Amino acid sequence: MQRFDDNTDGLKEQVVDFEDAEFEEALKNFKSSVHAWSDAAYSRPRTVAREVRVRSWRLAAGWALGCVLVAGSVSGGLMERHHRAELARIAAQQRAVEQARQLQQQQARAKITDEVLLADVDSAVSRQVPDAMEPLAQMMADDETK
Amino acid sequence: MRIVNQVVNSDTVRASTWVMAAGTALDAMAITTSDDAAAQEFAQVVERHRPQIFRFLLSSTRDVDLAETLTQECFLKAHRNWGSFRGESSAMTWLMRIAINLQKDHWRNRRMQFWRTTRTNSVDLDEASEWLPSGESSIEQQLLAKERVKQVWTAVKGLSERQRTVFLLRYVEEQELSEIAAATGLSEGTVKAHLSRAVARVRLELGGRR
């Protein structure tokens, strides 16, 4: 029984030794693998320049598009403003013409009204004068004749 | 007498001005020389340690582009702070500390930006396990070795950030516990504890005893 236990312990030790060796081997391989990968990645050709070029091209395109948009919106705004100013000017012109026309009409109406009023007054003025004023009326009539 | 004094005084002033100017020029030359020396020294440090920093970052991230970017950032940061490096630890330990912090910051930022669809270039474990020097072993042995390497990668992937860092520094970079402690800012006892857990995890993955 004692000998069997001794044998079992020995076997256990052998297993432990084997596992340790296997573990050490695995770690060694892992280290070699990482070193090999790192060396290969470290010495690989870099693609940074190309990426920068692509990025700079995109940057330039973005700037160009941005400039076009800004220029378009500014010029659109200016055109809109100019269009509105033009419309306002035409409207003001039309208003002025309309006002002048209305003024002329008013003046014409006023003139007609004055003439009609004078005619009315003329017609309404009595042609007969009192006897005492007859010599004066005669004199005015003579003056008008002259 | 007054005139002579004036002449002497003006000569003295001129001479002292010349000496000051010369001194300034010498100082400037000395600064330039010391700057050149520092730049040369830093260039040597970069040349010596860059591959190792890159390797550590590559094994931590499994992403070649990210490892390159972080390596660049690491040396940029080191260059900016090169004047304040007092040499209390080795340059390698100092650089490794910067690299570890950069890597932490990177993962923290990614966690904070979880709403963004960030693209990851991490290679899968099969691809990472492909890199194995063929040596003189047979095909069966190579396949077995690749399988074992893949299992180690799987275990490393499952480790916590600290455990992974400690494990990689110990078994890939072959650093001493004191160096790992200095680089990570942990005590040696904590490093041992993390390493022990990491090794247990790897052993378990390899199918061995804990």
Image: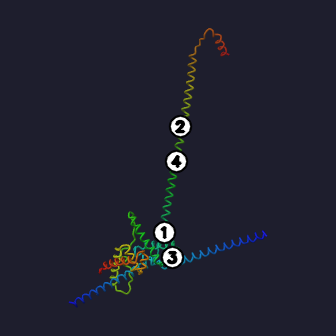
Rendered residue at 57%/23% (across/down): A114
- Read off the residue under disc 2: A95
Whether residue A8 is visible, yes or no, is yes
Rendered residue at 36%/86% (across/down): B137
Q: Is residue B33 above or below residue A85?
A: below
* Residue A12 horizontal/vertical position (percent): 27, 86
Of labels 2 and 3, the one closer to you: 3
Q: How many marks?
A: 4
Secondary element under disc 4, as helix, strand or loop, is helix
Please report, as a chain letter, where disc 1 is located. A
- Label 2: few (<14), some or many (≥20) within 10 Å? few
For residue A52, the mark is: 1
- Read off the residue under disc 4: A81
Are labels 2 and 1 assigned to the same chain?
Answer: yes
- Read off the residue under disc 3: B86
Q: Quick one: label 2 or label 4, which is nearer the N terminus?
A: 4
The answer to which of A68 and A11 lies nearer the viewer is: A11
Please, what is the three-letter code of the amino acid marked with disc 1?
Val
Please, what is the three-letter code of the amino acid marked with disc 3?
Arg
Q: How much space separates mark 2 and mark 4, taking CA atoms?
A: 21 Å
CB contact under 8 Å: marks 2 and 1: no
Q: Which quadrant would residue A6 be assigned to in this image?
A: bottom left
Q: Quick one: label 4 or label 1, which is nearer the N terminus?
A: 1
Q: How is the image coloured?
A: rainbow
Q: Name the image quarter holding the N terminus of chain B.
A: bottom right
CB contact under 8 Å: marks 2 and 3: no
